[in-house]
Amino acid sequence: MRPVGESAPRKDGPDKLCGAARYIDDHPIPGALFGVTVRSRSASGRIKGVRFDPSFPWAECVVADARDIPGKNAVHLLGDDQPLLADGVVRHAFEPVLLVGHPDRATAWRALENVTLEIEPIEPVLTMEDSVSRKRVIWGDDNVFKTITIKKGDAAAALAQAPVVVEGVYRVPHQEQAYIENQGMSAWFEEDGTLVVMGSLQCPYYVHKALQPIFALPAEKVRVIHAVTGGGFGGKEEYPNMLGGHAALLALKAKRPVKMIYDRTEDMQATTKRHPAVVRHRTGLTKDGRLLAQEIDILMDGGAYMTLSPVVLSRGILHATGPYECPNVSVLARSVATNTPPNGAFRGFGAPQTLFAAEMHWEKIASVLGKDPVDLRRRNAVKVGSVLATGQVLKESVSAGKVLETAVKRSNWTAARRAHARWNKDPGKPTWRGLGLSLVHHGAGFTGNGEVYLKSRAGLAIDRAGRVTVLAGSTEMGQGASSTLAQIAADALGVPYGSVSVERPDTARVPDSGPTVASRTTMVVGGLVRRAASDLRTALAKAAGRAPSGAPAFRRAARKLCGAASERRFLAEYERPAGLTFDDVNYVGDAYGSYGFAACAVELEVDRTTFEVRLLRVFTAQDVGKAVNPRVVEGQIAGGTVQGLGWALLEQCVYKDGALQNPRLTDYVIPTALDVPDIEVAIVEDPYSCGPFGAKGVGEMPMDPPGPAVAAAVFNATGLFLPTLPILPERIQEAADEEAARRALK
Amino acid sequence: MRGDAGSMTYLRPRDPEEALRLAGECPDALALAGGTDIMVAWNAGRLNGRSILDLSGLDDWRRVSTTRDGIDIGALVTHAQLIRHRELAAGWPLLAAACATVGGPQIQARGTLGGNIANASPAGDTFPALAVYEARVRVRSSRGGRELPFAEVFAGVKRTHLAPGELIVSVHLPRPPEPDRQLFRKVGTRAAQAISKAVAAGLLWTDSGGSVRELRFALGSMAPTVRRLRRAEEFLRGRRLDKGVVSEAARLLEEDVSPISDVRSTAAYRLRASQNILRGFLEGRLETP
């Protein structure tokens, strides 16, 4: 059996099952202080002073503030606007101001109760609407982090002439990543002055790059090591830059190692969330439901600092039309500042927000036209040769129709909807039942020219004993990256999966493979590993005089290849597939090399007494090009679907004065095993010619379709059109009461 | 973990007498039964500097015994024990049903009935059932014992009328006549590990003509403490459950509760869901078998 396509056991599985895996807090760091963070309670204000309660043993503590930063006080990402520690001004609740280290963890936590920040409040801007209208300018000249437009044809003219125009406004909320392991980092300085940071993170080279200007250190004096990481979902894409900087700053001042581990409350209050968004659609159609024009306006809340907001917006706008072909498109997207904790990367990265709107809008269109929403999607879905809003021509691996038909068939669409209509007519039934469906696409890898700028490198090492190790900066955080890369290497080399190991991501030992984000690890990094494997295979054949066959021959060839060296490394660097171009100023061209496609059908019932929603069946068909490890892929799809169902039905960040009021998993409600049925997954494989073995992206797409499928199913069940997530029982009750009042008036 | 064990005093009595003596000597000590709520507070550092009186070694308070008059449940009996208890399930099924909705299996295995009462959360899942069964809570201190009707146990959110040094020893449920209809319903934030948005228990006895002999109906999470619907209960006595009467009872419900909007739900939803549950129960659509 060839390794690719096998459900090989995960490389990280045994250690995690046995409790042997060491997360950052499991690493004993001799002599380390425990660091905690003094944060602003206020959303906006001037720091007037700091009061230290004299009864607390401050002499035992190390305290660091912005003045202790040897380099630039900025957490470098797309911009330099976010300070590592607030200096004079705070711009969001829970913004870090001071760091305190103490050898005893409990004492360090208690320090927080003995220090008070005196902050003179400045009226905050807390909503996107207030930000856009410039109630107060809090960022740049106009509160706007980024504006992007996309134009195809003439949408305004087409709308003016369209026989049918349908409008809608859709809102989606914050979402917490809720990884099982909270954020945590350790830092120390080696005797030669090298700064070492180890912790829970997705992107070692992001941290590596961010720390250099803060500490005014050259690249070779910073080393970042990945500890076993308990989930990321995007939440550990950029925040570790901040926490790594904090731990390192305390370590610098204390001249001792420092460990900083957030608890759940601090993690939820202070770290990034999914960007909330408001999306407006105006759509022109023929009477039989063919798209003529789409006019879309997207507004996203970036929070107080830029972080990754421009690129989240970019992915958001590029998915805003949904997987449909329309001759005239005009999209305006803006990401704006508010005095709330910065929002950031989260699985799907802007696409779930705009796809929710696009898909729910089809439900509205269907009810206006009196047509079946599936038929409308069928009529407009992209196929090979379709032209997207950016002018990108889809040349291959376009499976929108296939995943849609699979979901229609497996959900028993027509018969189930008919049966539910009968059930709902009977007032004696305790529930209303409904079936909803959604169809999405998801671009794999970095947007536009992102992969070209990244210049990722990855590859393999082989030693004299013939042991092969994958060298990649891609991190394992539970998603199965290590086994997937090892399977690709083993398959390309023609060796058993068990004989390939994976190097721990450590900037001193692995090349920069780019961040572990954007559904790019299998497709992009896997592609580099495959190319390196192919180079290694050629080199082995050359060294041995012919291709080695069997383990002993492989070892002999390796010894010859290594010669006097203990190992040889084969690295490949990213090259853009031929024929792709993207203009990232005007948003014209090939936004992504390939797209995955997914459809999801959700069958649910709404309790007539309490408006509680119970999921009856969830089916999803997703095209990933090639499932390198089917079990891992199914796990990603099922897990992402559950995360999407949580966003749709349960999860709500409650804010007051810009501060999260429910920073606990007691009150921020994510689904338990009892809240979701078994997720039925059909993996579709429509290969992509430039992906390794045909693979496209996997990780993010499952997050996209559950939200609109749930809202469509609630609409089908109750007749209530709810364009805002989450669809809590409270929202259904409110809408039902309004509907009853409207009927009573008639 | 912000809990600082070094700052805390930990007391672990070996028998009830020692427990009562320590409770008297250290009236500020927080009694630990199952610890499921205490561990949350500990983790957040809210118990730093406090004393803990760990009762978990007192096996005498871990027993359930039935008599002809009723059932006695030791304060340290866990929810899991009650879920499995045959006689409780036969005579007081609403309490067994309530225990099965507390947290999840792990919480049910640790959490105790006495601890649940002493914790006095407005959202206590067992309280509506205890209220309609008209439980009596037996408390003791080193100076002696007394018995409180369940309706008189709670003073407010997280506060009871227990005097300093008093500990809950057991809960007595009198044996009710077989009801004609009964209901337990929890409206939580999700299917498990959920705190109640509203929680209801009801017992209904009717006469041969279909008129109400007695209704007992209680709601949790709808006021600072669990509430019996005294107005609706009085109104329904002797009446037939026709449409107008049921509507009036649902309207009267409002007069005995004062729901709030918080991070878990809204006042409007809590009220509407509770009214719908009461209606469904009175109309015979909602029942616990």
Image (cartoon, grey):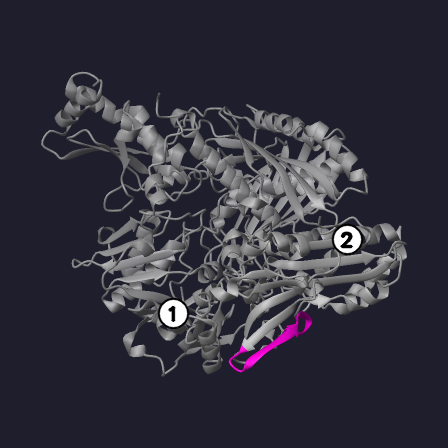
Whole-percent x, y for residue A551 in the image: 21, 22
Residue most extreme to the top: A546
Left or right of A81, for residue B221: right
Mark 2 and mark 1 on one chain = no
Which label sits in the foreground, 2 or 1? 2
- Name the amino acid, label 2: Arg
- Name the outermost residue toward the front: B68
Q: Magenta segment: does it hold A456?
A: no
Q: Is residue A587 visible?
A: no
Which corner quadrant of the image does residue A252 belong to?
bottom left
Tell me which amino acid carries mark 1: Trp
For label 2, the residue is B181
User: Could you tell me which quadrant the N terminus of chain B lies in?
Assistant: bottom left
**Letter of the chain that mark 1 sits on in the rendering:** A
The front one of A54 and B167 is B167
Residue that appears at 34% across and 33% down? A485
Residue A389: image x %, image y %?
57, 35
Does the residue at mark 2 contact the one at mark 1 (Cβ under 8 Å)? no
- Seen in the picture, residue A412 relative to A724 is either above or below; the reply is above
Res B125 → quadrant: bottom right
Q: Residue at x 39, y 56 (%)?
A: A183
Is A261 displayed left or right of B149 in the figure?
left
Q: Which mark is residue A616?
A: none
- Between residues A38 and A210, which one lies in front from this camera angle? A38
Q: Secondary structure at mark 2?
A: strand
Q: Chain of mark 2?
A: B
The magenta-colored residue range is B141-153
Residue neighbourhood size for the residue with mark 1, other residues' Cα within 10 Å, grouped as few (<14), some (14–19), many (≥20):
many
For disc 1, the marked residue is: A109
Mark 2 and mark 1: span between their CA atoms? 53 Å
